[in-house]
Every structure is written in C-alpha cells, then in structure tokens.
Image (cartoon, grey):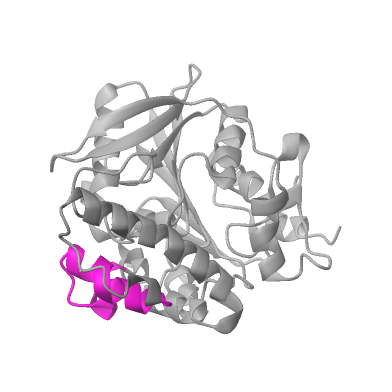
Amino acid sequence: MVRLWTAFPFSNGHVHTVFPVLFRAQPDLDYERQRLDTSDGDFLDLDWSCGKSDRLVLILHGLEGHSRRKYVLGMGRAARAHGFDVLAMNFRGCGGEMNRKLTMYHSGLTQDLHEVLCMVQGQGRYASADIVGFSLGGNVLLKYLGEDAARVPGIVRRAVAFSVPCDLEDAAEALARPQCAIYVRYLLDQLRKKIREKNRLFSSALDVQGLDSIRTFREFDDRFTAPLHGFRNARDYWRRCSCRQFLSGIDRRTCIINAANDPFLGPKCFPRAEAAHHPCLQLFSPLTGGHVGFAGSGQNGMYWSEWAAMCFLCSHEDLDVQNLLAAETVV
C-alpha cells in the first residue's frame, strides 16, 4: 500500500501539483520509439517499454506533456513492475518534432488514439490493453470510450483517468482564477511557441498579431484551437469535446480519480451523478492530490496515483474504494 501525503503542506492542492515537478526524481524507464503514420498523412511518435508480456498499458499525457514527463515515466515504471508492457503515446507535435499538419492535438481528438489501438490490436502481440490518461489525455480517453463504444477495439479492457477536466468550460473558468495564473502562464508560453513554429512552417498561415497579449485559455482557444480544428469558438469547442456528456456510453471498466482540491478543476468536472449508477464507471475523489500530483511514499518511489492505477488494473473486481480511503493516511 502507498500512503497519499495529506499532512500540511500536502493538504494544499497547489503543493501536490507543484511538488512532483520540482522535487520528484526522474523515474527510470527506457523507451524504444516508433513513428506511426496516421490516416490523414500526419504522424504520431510512440514510445515503447517492453518485456515479454501479453498485457499492455497505454499512457496518455496531459496538455503540453510528453512521454518523458515524470508522471508518465512513473506510471510506466509501475506498470512494468506489475507485469505489463508499456506504450506512451505522444500527441501530435509533442514527441520532440512538430507534426506535419497545420492542425495539432486538442481535448476532443480521439481518432489518433483509435488508430494507435487498432495498430496494437493488429499486431496480435497482446491479449489486452488497458489505458491510463492524465488531464487532457484523460478527457480524450473518456470521450473516446463513450462516444461510440462499438468502435473501440476488443483488446481494450480497462481504463483509469486522473485529474480529468470532464467539463472543459468549467475547467477553463477554474484556471482563470488569480491563484492559477502561474499554471496558465506556463502552459500558454508552451502553446505560443508552437503557434509561432506552425506559422513559420506554414508560411504565415496564422494571424499571430497580439499572440503575446493572450492571458486566458478562452482567448487562446477562441483565436487558435477552435478555428484550426473546425469549431465556431472556444465555447463550441469546450461543449462538443467535454467528456462528461459521453460517460453514459462507456462499456469498459473505467475509473476516474479527481482530487477534491485540484486547482485546475471546477465543480462540474466531478461527474458524481453519471457515476452513481453506472455499471462500468467509478469516480473517486480523494480530499487532496492536486492536479496530476498524488505524491505518496511507496517502494521504488511509487506515487499514490500509480499504486491506485495498478490496484484497479490488476484486480478482477472494481476498485476497492474503502482500501483507497484507508490509504489516505496523514504522514
């Protein structure tokens, strides 16, 4: 059992969010890279860590993340220790090289995940594939599982999603609060760099005037994300791509773990009503954990989120919520 750190200062969601970024040692996990060409002429960079298992864990990172983020490496290392092979998927433009298209990735783009899973199933190496998604990657995962369950390859068995902005508009409003300015500034800086690089590669196809003055995700998504990907505006994008509306369609065993003090999430990001009587979906909201934080103390540096995911993926039943509650111990 891994104990979630809950004593001061880890009772604060911002501390849980920032601590792993600044102080967690980089988990060891060796990758082999594969480039997968997509059906629309673009590509995805996939990072594999394999033994000889017939069970796979596919990991999806968050906004402006990639396969070398500590939370991805930590989850991958935990999965390998529990007998899984690991595949970390880099969203378009996140693998270290800009993607070929003017379009990029976004919170509702599920086709790339579908093509990766079809590729995995087509290889015939694995009896099952479980999926772990973080933040934006969690929204993509849940939307994919619920928007057309019959389309999901049969190899997919279970899914776990952490720190999910189940209602994208509500999450954007939460991030617009003054206490979240440091996160927004960092993420928008990364997105601005990509917009400038896209503009250079595509001969000034984008209007970048005033790019540096953008201060909120509403402004950025209105200017770039929505028009680049066929949405009317930011609100249209958020409403059409929020996973909450698709949860009822999920037919694989799925667990959402959103910390109650996640600074990135508003109250609509906790789909309690949808999970209450759902035959396949569980929602767990520990009192602390922040956004993709969930620091804890476990063997080989395992974090609480990694332990919780492995509990769910290695169990023959649903996640034992009482066991997780017992693990929320002040240390």
Residue that appears at 73% across and 39% down? 301
Looking at the image, residue 61 lies above or below residue 187:
above
Task: Tell me which segment is drawn in magenta.
Answer: 214-241
Residue that appears at 61% across and 40% down? 74
Looking at the image, residue 59 lies above or below residue 218:
above
> Residue 25: x and y, percent?
70, 40
Residue that appears at 20% across and 43% down? 100
Residue that appears at 45% across and 75% down? 171
Say if the magenta span includes residue 178.
Answer: no
In the image shown, does 141 or 220 lie closer to the viewer?
220
Farthest-out residue, top: 52
Say if the magenta span includes residue 226.
Answer: yes
> Residue 4: x and y, percent?
74, 56
Looking at the image, residue 285 lies above or below residue 153:
below
Q: In the figure, is residue 323 to the left or right of 73?
A: right
Q: In the figure, is residue 201 to the left or right of 138?
A: left
Could you say which quadrant of the image residue 207 lies in?
Answer: bottom left
